[in-house]
Image (tube, helix red, strand yellow):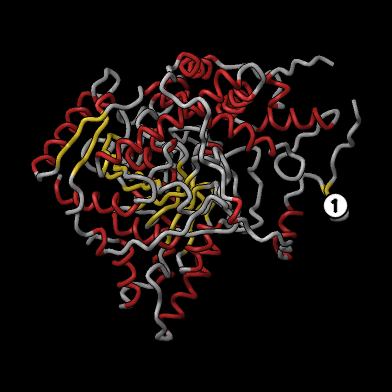
Amino acid sequence: MSSQIHSIHQQLVNKDITCTALVQEKLDLLKQNTNNTVNALLDTLALDLAAKVDAKIANGETIGLLEGIPFGIKDVYMVQGTYTTASSDLLKNYKSAYTATAIQKLLDAGAIPLVKENCDSFGHGSSSENTIFGAVKNAINPDLVGGGSSGGSAVNVAKDYTVFSIGGDTGGSVRQPAGYNNVYGLKPTYGRISRYGLMAYASSTDCVGPIAKSIEDIRIVLNVMSGKDAKDQTTYASAEITPDSIANSNTIKTVGYFKNFIENDSIDATIKADFLATIEKIKAKGIAVKALDFFESETLVSTYYTLAMAETASNLSRLDGTNYGNRIEGDNLKDTYAITRSENFSEETKRRIVGGNQVLSQGFSDAIYLKGLALRDAIAENFEKDFSAVDIIISPVTPNTPPKIGDSLKDPHAMYLSDAYTVGFSLGQLPTLTVPQGTATGLQITAAKNNDELVLKFANFLKDTI
Amino acid sequence: MSKIMTVDVLSSIKGAQPSEAVNKLFEVIKNANTANTNTSNNHNNAVSLNDLRDDVVIDSSATEKQIIIENFPKEKNGYLVVSKVIEE
C-alpha cells in the first residue's frame, strides 16, 4: 500500500527526519517554484506547528497519523488570519476571520498548512489562468496549463511540494487538474464534507476535495474531513472508510460507460483508444461492461453553466466593497458598487455574473433557468436508473490533453465544452475520483450517491489491473 | 424610472453586455428536448426542516472581530465608513 502519509509518519516516529526539516524543505521548494502555484506561504505558522510536533516526539509522546504532515490549501478556503484572495484583485488584501470546517478538522488532526494555492479566480475557469498571480504551469510540461480551477493544488501535489492539497470542485475543478497533472483527485458526494468556509461559487454543486498521490492518502484525508456540520445544513453523517473495506473489489460485478462520450468527433483519438483498451482489460477480469446512453455533451455543459452562473451571480453579489474588499469610491453608493466590481473582477468572472443575471431575469428564467433545473432533474434520474444496472461508471476525465497556456483564454466557449465529462457528475452530486491511469489525463470512477467507498474500492482494483 | 433593468445594472458592472460564448450555452438549453422531463421541477436540494441548527446567537471571538475590522475598506474610530445613501 503506497502512502506518503504513512511513510512520512513512520519517518517522524523513527526520528529519521524532524518535522521542522521536512516543513522547511517543502517551504523552500514552494518558494523557489516556477509553476506559479503559490499565492501566499504560511511559513511562520507552519514552522511553529512543526516545532510543536518535534517537541512532542522528543518527549516520547504518541503522534497521530496526520500530525506533522504538510499540506496545501486552495486559496478559496478561510484559514483564520491568513490572506484568502480567491486569486482576485477584489480580495487581494482580504484576511480570513475564521477557519473553514474541513481545514479546521485537518488542523485538529495535526496536519500542517504550508500554502494558499493559486487557482482560477473564484473557481471561474478550467485552466488556472484566470488569476492575478500568473497562470499555473503544468507539472509535467510547463508550457501547458495546470488545469483548473484547483490548478495550483494539483501541481503542488504532483511536484511533491505538498503531501496532499485541498481543492474545491464545482464542475470538475479537482478532477480535471488532477488528470492534467497525473495525480488522484476526489470529488466526494455532495454534502459529505462541510462547505463552511469555502468561498461559494455554485452552492448546489460546490464540494471540498482532496488531491494526493495515492488512494490511501485520499482515504485518510477524506475520513478526517467528512461529517455532519451544523454550519452547513447540506452535510450528512457518513461512516469511516476503512482500509479493509476498499481492499477487495469482489462486490463489483458490472461497470458502465457512456458511449456518447467516446463515440464523438471531439475526443482525442489516443484518449479514445486508451479508454477502450482499459474497458477490454476490465472485461478480461470477468467484470461485465455495459455501454450506457447519456445526455449530449453540449446539453450537460450548458445545463451546468446555466445553473452555476445563476448561483455565482447571486453568491458574488455580496462582493461590493462595502464591508471588505478593494473598494474604489465613486460619486455615490451605487457608483461605488459598480466601479469596485467593474475594476476588480476578471473578464471571466464578469462574464459569468452577467450570464447568471441574464438567466435569472424576467423573460429568461422560464425559458432557460427553470428549464436548466428540469434538465438537471432528468440527468439525476438518468444516474439513478444507471446505478440500478451498474455498480460503477468509468469515463475519461477530459476529451483532450491540456491546452497550451494562453489558448483557453482566447475561446471561453471551447473552455466550457472541455468540461463535458466532469460536469454531469457534479449535477448528479455523485462521488467521482480521478485516477492517473488509463488515458493521458486519467480516468474518472463514479458510483451512486453516498457510495464514496465503492469508488475507492474500484480505484484499488484498477491500480492492480491496468 | 424605467422598469427595464439591463444586465449591467443588475450585475453592478459598468458597460456589461451579454457575451456570445455564454449565449451559445443558453441557446442549447432553449432548444433542448425536455419532453420526457417532469416539468414540475422536483428539485430535491432543500434541507430538512426537522434538522435545523439551534437558533442561538454565538458571539464571535475577539480575534474574529479584530480581523473583520482590519478588513474594513474604510474605518474611523473602529467603525465602518460607507457612502451615505440618497433615495432616488
Residue A96 seen in this snapshot: yes
Which quarter of the image is occupied by the C terminus of chain A? top left
**Horizontal and vertical percent position of residue A66:** 40, 67
Q: Residue at x 71, y 24 (%)?
A: B10
Q: Which residue is mark 1?
A: B79
Query: In this view of the protein, which residue sits in the foreground, A155 or A263?
Result: A263
A314, above or below A367, in the image: below
Q: How many marks?
A: 1
- The amino acid sitting under disc 1 is Tyr
Q: Residue at x 51, y 40 (%)?
A: B44
**Which quarter of the figure has residue A300?**
top left
Query: In this view of the protein, which residue sits in the foreground, B27 or A150?
Result: B27
Chain to which the residue tagged by mark 1 belongs: B
Which quarter of the image is occupied by the N terminus of chain A? bottom left
A224, above or below A392, in the image: below
**Horizontal and vertical percent position of residue A219:** 34, 58
**Which quarter of the figure has residue A67?**
bottom left
Q: Residue at x 71, y 57 (%)?
A: B67
A136, above or below A46, in the image: above
